[in-house]
Amino acid sequence: MEEIGRLLLESREQLGLSLDEVERATRIRVYHLEALERGEMEALPSPVQARGFLHNYAEFLGLDAGAITLQYAEALQSRRSRLLPETSYKEPGTGPSVRILSRRPRWFSSDLFIATTIILAILAVLIWGGSRVITVLRQRTETPQAALGLLIPTTTPTLTETPLQSGPGTESSIEPDLEETPIPTQPLFLGVADKVNLTVVVELSAWLKVMVDDEEAFQGRVESGDVFEFQGDQVVELITGNGAAIHIFYNGQDHGILGDVGQVIIRLWTLEGALTPTATITRTPSVTPRISETPSPTTTSPPTPSG
């Protein structure tokens, strides 16, 4: 190293240049130039920069830059060889021991660290995404699909007879009394919705009337293939003279054909479900008064004397 520095110093002095002039020409700091001329290459930031400064400085002085940099590389390699640890190995039964220069391999580097980090991040994302997908699928399969229901009781009126008190001149009569006795029926559970959505699909010709929230929405004759949609806040009422002609879909559920051919149908759909009005049976009691015959008095004339 000292030989390279001495060569640089002598060449600069022969050219009559100062370090400041060399700095302005080569853009190399003065303290770096002084380190090169002293042969103290280790004082430079790194071997790579030292080689670059040496090449530029030698080329500026008109020297053989390639030969000087090659000499520097050989000197650097020689110094590194002297700094490496030496191990002795001798096979049993052989001659003198042989020196083997060994260098500890670098198993861990920055590239390996970056690659390992990226792989771990990808694995973490895949595991997290898979767990999320499994959780969503499990919730969909385990969530009960049962809808809310409402119990709609129905009652059937029955007739009971209550005897009336008999008065003079009349026979005891029977006055029917209507009394509602609840009869247990199969409960009907229907889904609860915010709106009453009714879709009417016409299968045959018929007369149709539709009331939505007590207001007339349609009235007239319909033909096969017609489709109507009605939406109400509380109730949708449908009246038709041909039950077999009307196919109903209530809130997306198929309620099928309403009835038979020529059957008059009156049906209501509310937020709670479908309702069928029940006709009220009334009977007018008939009381037949008993006519009693009272014998009328007769006048008997006195006998006329005969003369």
Image (cartoon, grey):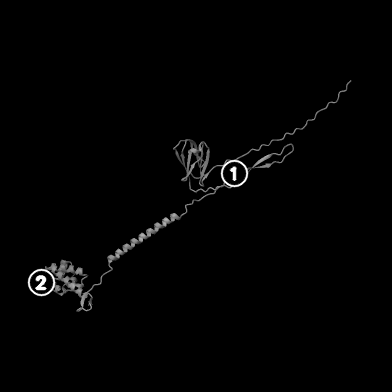
Q: Please count the marks in the image.
A: 2
The quarter in which the C terminus is drawn is top right
Tell me if mark 2 has few (under 14), some (14-19) or many (20+) residues whose alpha carbon lies within 10 angstroms of its own.
few
Q: Nearer the viewer, residue 38 or 73?
A: 73
* 95 vs 46: above or below: below
Residue at point 29% right, 63% down?
A: 115
SS at mark 2 in the image: helix
Q: Looking at the image, is 148 positioned above or below residue 298?
A: below
Q: Is residue 64 above or below residue 164?
A: below
Q: Compare marks 1 and 2 and give the one earlier in the sequence.
A: 2
Q: Residue furthest left?
A: 14
In the drawing, does residue 71 fall left or right of residue 248?
Answer: left
Say which of marks 1 and 2 sits in front. 1
- Towards the viewer: 1 or 154: 154
Q: Is residue 202 left or right of residue 37?
A: right
The residue at the far top in this view is 307
Give percent across and percent down for residue 257.
Answer: 49, 41
Q: Quadrant of the N terminus?
A: bottom left
x and y percentages locating residue 102 in the rendered image: 23, 73
**Residue 91 as seen in the image, left or right of residue 283:** left
How many neighbours does mark 1 have within 10 angstroms: few (below 14), some (14-19), or many (20 or more)? some
| Residue 79: assigned label | none
Give me the disc on residue 14: 2
Helix, strand, or loop for circle 1?
A: strand
Q: Amino acid at mark 1?
A: Thr
Amino acid under label 2? Gln
Q: What percent of the width, then of the height, locates residue 42?
A: 20, 73
Circle 1 sits on which residue? 156
| Residue 55 image point, x, y percent | 16, 68
Q: CA distance from mark 1 to mark 2?
A: 132 Å
Tell me where residue 132 sits by quadrant: bottom left
Q: Residue at x 52, y 42 (%)?
A: 268
